[in-house]
Amino acid sequence: MEKLKAFLKRKNIVISAKRYGIDALGAMAQGLFCSLLIGTIINTIGTQFHIPFLTQVVATLGSGDHTISYTVGGLASAMSGPAMAVAIGYALQAPPLVLFSLATVGFASNTLGGAGGPLAVLFIAIIAAELGKAVSKETKVDILVTPLVTIFAGVALAAWWAPAIGKAAAQVGALIRWATELQPFWMGIIVSVVIGIALTLPISSAAICAALTLTGLAGGAAVAGCCANMVGFAVLSFKENGWGGLVSQGIGTSMLQMPNIVKNPRIWLPAILTSAITGPMATCLFHLQMNDPAGGVASGMGTCGLVGQIGVYAGWVNDVATGVKAAITPMDWVGMALICFILPAVLCWLFGQLFRKMGWIGEGDLTLPQ
């Protein structure tokens, strides 16, 4: 056992919840953002502003009746599997030969995983990366052995596990979406609160939403929960952090408050209570849906770079194009503004004032660490 521990330490293989559940998951979300989500944004901008370079075909694969055409955004989206796997490898501090080999693993896992591809990539890329790290520089022909082990292990696992993982993730996501359609009030609360909490915790809410393909009303509730935490904390802590804190939390991340939450968990209550209100309002009153072609990743982004709002808008455009929605209405814009910005700011501030008077939130409790 001691020899095994020494080997794992030498190979920088750290089997822990933080390494896999926080570092790898967070990196996967970044890879997904830099490929699938950015591709969706590029396509939306190109279509809405009629920019020829962003809407014209720049690459065509195949021949005859079996051709696939890609725009700039389409190329970015098509690389989501490799981008996620390489990002995971980077988070696991994989050496170069392992890192580059993960591109193939990610492509295979994402393709075979179907709708639940991101979750398949997460599991399989982690295993392939660690196996690759284990054999890295252990032989004189490392340039052959390391890529062969990484790719063979990853592709074999993708063929074996990815369809089942993808199907399971898709079914869980479908169950959540179905339950939200059936019980929009209660599920609106649950999804909004849970995803909002995930956003502020040091895990990736975007990766969770993408893995479960959290779209439709459930996606709308997820956006509401994320905005309640980001905009809520930004306004709630304005007294302590000023404009810098407003921007860094409002369009950055509410995760900045985690050290303060650990010290005084009650400072989280205003944002959580706000998400419990805006979630069902999103599902029942405004019928806010997240139908972005990126498969739900924007659902877990909130106001981070306004990606959540861009995702909602991209969903509207997609629904109009496919005939699901007749047009984008003024009520759509009102609903987005209220759920994503106005209500989180007002409600969280009001709850904050109440808790300050009760003594649950003290002076300096919301000051961001320097």
Image (tube, helix red, strand yellow):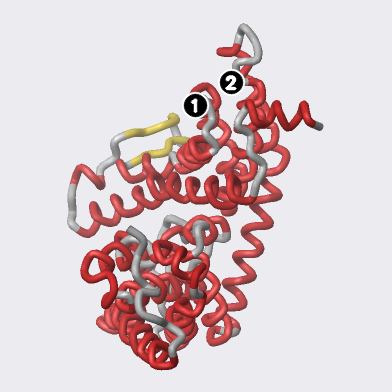
Tell me the quadrant of the picture where the N terminus can be found: top right
Residue 206 appears in the figure: yes
- CA neighbours of label 2 inside 10 A, class few (<14), some (14 to 19), many (20+): many
Disc 2 marks which amino acid? Answer: Pro
Up the image or down, 283 lies above or below 64; here it is: below
- In the picture, the disc for residue 100 is 1
Left or right: 121, with 365 as reference point:
right
- State the residue in front, 32 or 364: 364
Query: Can you give x and y, in whole percent of width and height, for residue 37 in the image?
Result: 38, 52
Left or right: 130, with 230 as reference point:
right
Up the image or down, 36 lies above or below 172; here it is: above
Query: Can you give x and y, in whole percent of width and height, for residue 212 in the image?
Result: 57, 60
Up the image or down, 197 lies above or below 72; here it is: below
Q: Quadrant of residue 67?
A: top left
Tell me the quadrant of the picture where the C terminus can be found: bottom left
- State the residue in front, 46 or 1: 1
Residue 327 appears in the figure: no
Query: Can you give x and y, in whole percent of width and height, for residue 101 in the image?
Result: 54, 26
Query: Can you give x and y, in whole percent of width and height, for residue 201 in the image?
Result: 50, 63
Instruction: State the residue position of label 2.
Output: 147
Residue that protrudes farthest toward the front in the picture: 363
Residue pictured at 20% horizontal, 42% vertical: 53
Disc 1 marks which amino acid? Answer: Phe
Residue pictured at 54% horizontal, 84% vertical: 184
User: At numbered mark 2, what does the secondary structure look like: helix, strand or loop?
Assistant: helix
Q: CA distance from mark 1 to mark 2?
A: 8 Å
Left or right: 361, with 237 as reference point:
right
Q: Earlier in the sequence, mark 1 or mark 2?
A: 1
- State the residue in front, 44 or 343: 343
| Tag 1–tag 2 contact (CB < 8 Å) | yes
